[in-house]
Every structure is written in C-alpha cells, then in structure tokens.
Image: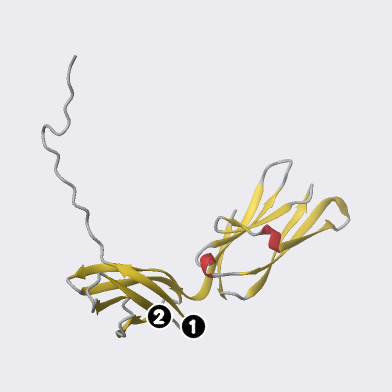
Amino acid sequence: MNQKIKKQFEAGTEVITTCTATSGNPPADLLWTIGDKDITHFSENTTTETGDDTRLHNTESRLMYAFNASDDQQYLKCESFQHDSLTSRSSLVLMNVQHVPVIQAIVVDSWEGNTVVVECLATANPDDVIYSWESDHGQTGNTGTSNKWELIDDDDDDEVTVTCNARNSIDSTSLTEIVKKPYIPTVPIPTENLYTSKKK
C-alpha cells in the first residue's frame, strides 16, 4: 500500500530524508525518485540483520537532496525492490517547494497599432506574485497581481525590449526579452486550374 503525505520546504535547502525497508530476504534495494527524475545517487544505503534471524535484513536509505523549483508539486518516492519476487512497496511524499518566481517567457497578448499588451509567464510558490515592468524606451509600470502590461511602441518599429520583474514573499526575479509584432502570413487562394495534368 502506498502512503501519501505532504511536506513543505524552501528551494535550495538541503533536506535529509530516510526510508527503511524491514525484514527483507534478500536485502531490499531502495530507489528514490522525484517526479520522473531518479535521484537515488544522492542517497546512502546501509543494511543490518534483523535481530537473531540472520535470514532477514533491514535496509535504510539516507537521502541528502536540495529541492528546487522544478520539484514543486512533484511526488518524492522511495521504493523498495526485491529482486527475486519482483514485489515492491513505496512511500509517496508530495513536495511543496517554496521558491522565487520562475519566468518562462514574455509573450505578446495583443498588438493593435502601436499599443502593445505583453504577458509574463511565471510560476511561483507561494503564488502571491507582484509584477512590475520596464521597456527600452523608458516606460515603466506596476500591474500588481496581473501578469499583463500595456505599453506603447514609441518608434513604431514593430519590436520592443521588455523587462518583467516578478516578486513573491520569498524573493524576486526578472527576465528581459525582445518582443516582436506578430504577422499572420497571407496565403493566396488556389484557383481551379492552378495545377493541371495531361492524360496520355
């Protein structure tokens, strides 16, 4: 049976976690994963005999790992594995990893004339993110919890350099990107006799 619990940590903090498999014969292998990522190499295993019965063994694995933003809301899993019977038991821990905002991109939400609305795509934990902005033309803005900002393309050259600053209760981060006006390509409508073939 899988056991599921939830733990909260701050990103970058090394956490020591132990997992134990008891009374195994042969001794169990203990494997660690976070989401789809194998992190067993961050652990150390020790095996001891169970009391007076030398046939049975306890295995303890000690994981030393610093969780990061990509681990947030992922399950930390410790799985014991018996080679001969191919049976396993596992324990799942949902990781609530608090981290500064991670900005993936700044994208154009709309571009009408020289009025531009950009959107800052970010994730954070906690998600109490406050946004502020700058452009290469000296424009600035504070949009509070909204991740969208309206600005003007002053020189009407269909591109502008924008900086998004995202701050939560942990810390702040920023990203600067050049955004360009999107254009929908014009595709001619094929005429009925555009392609013809001759029958022999």
Q: Which residue is mark 1?
A: 171
Callout 2 secondary element = strand
Q: Earlier in the sequence, mark 1 or mark 2?
A: 2
Q: Position of residue 150 (x, y in %)?
A: 25, 77
Which kind of residue does numbered mark 1 sit on? Answer: Asp
Above or below, 45 relative to 85? below
Residue in the picture at 55% in, 67% down:
95
Q: Is residue 184 above or below residue 114?
A: above
Q: Nearer the viewer, residue 158 or 72?
A: 158
On the image, numbered disc 2 is attached to which residue?
A: 165
97 vs 82: above or below: below
The image quadrant of residue 146 is: bottom left
The outermost residue toward the left is 192
Measuring from the top left, give residue 66's x and y in whole percent.
Answer: 63, 70
| Horizontal side of residue 37 vs 142, given as left or right | right
Q: Nearer the viewer, residue 52 or 45?
A: 45
